Amino acid sequence: MKSIYHIISPVYFLILLCWITSLLLRQFISSDWLTSYVDDILCLPIVLGFALIIQRKVVLKHSLFCFSRLQITAVWLYFSVVFELIFPFITNAYITDWLDIGCYGLGVIIFALAINQPITKTASLQ
């Protein structure tokens, strides 16, 4: 039986754990940095990691699939434009924060270096 590590990097689960922890900490700690930027840093590794699972398990059914740099950059640009330019323009529920774009970029770098790897590297840890 194949383990979950044949689908996605263990780092993805660490990032999910950090996100869940930040959600729980908000109940007890009032921190602008925690509520504003941690989610933005973790957002794209979670979204792209989930997309990578879908590509590897459902669409392509190939554990060596990785997103290209162009695809990752396109997702970063998409999130930056939609969440920092378009949504603030059409609704007051969103505010343009240029630091968020940097946080999305940091998340993309984390994804590219730690998660978006052929699964054979992490499968050898078993």
Image: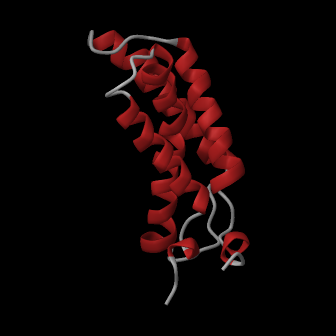
Residue 92 falls in image quadrant: top left
Residue drawn where x is 57% and y is 15% of the image: 99
Name the one closer to the observer, 12 or 50.
12
Residue 116 in percent (x, y) is at: 64, 56
- The answer to whether residue 24 is left or right of residue 17 is left
- The answer to whether residue 97 is left or right of residue 68 is left
Name the one closer to the observer, 110 or 55.
110
- The answer to whether residue 76 is left or right of residue 113 is left
Q: How is the image coloured?
A: secondary structure
- Name the residue furthest front: 28
- The answer to whether residue 2 is left or right of residue 9 is left
Q: Residue 71, relative to residue 57: is it above or below?
A: above
Residue 24 in percent (x, y) is at: 36, 36
Name the one closer to the observer, 53 or 15.
15
Residue drawn where x is 45% and y is 56% of the image: 50
For the C terminus, the image quarter is bottom right
Q: Residue 20, relative to residue 55: is it above or below?
A: above
Residue drawn where x is 27% and y is 14% of the image: 93
- Circle count: 0
Residue drawn where x is 42% and y is 25% of the image: 82
Residue 38 in percent (x, y) is at: 51, 29
Q: Residue 122, relative to residue 2: is it above or below?
A: above
Residue 120 falls in image quadrant: bottom right
- Name the residue furthest bottom: 1
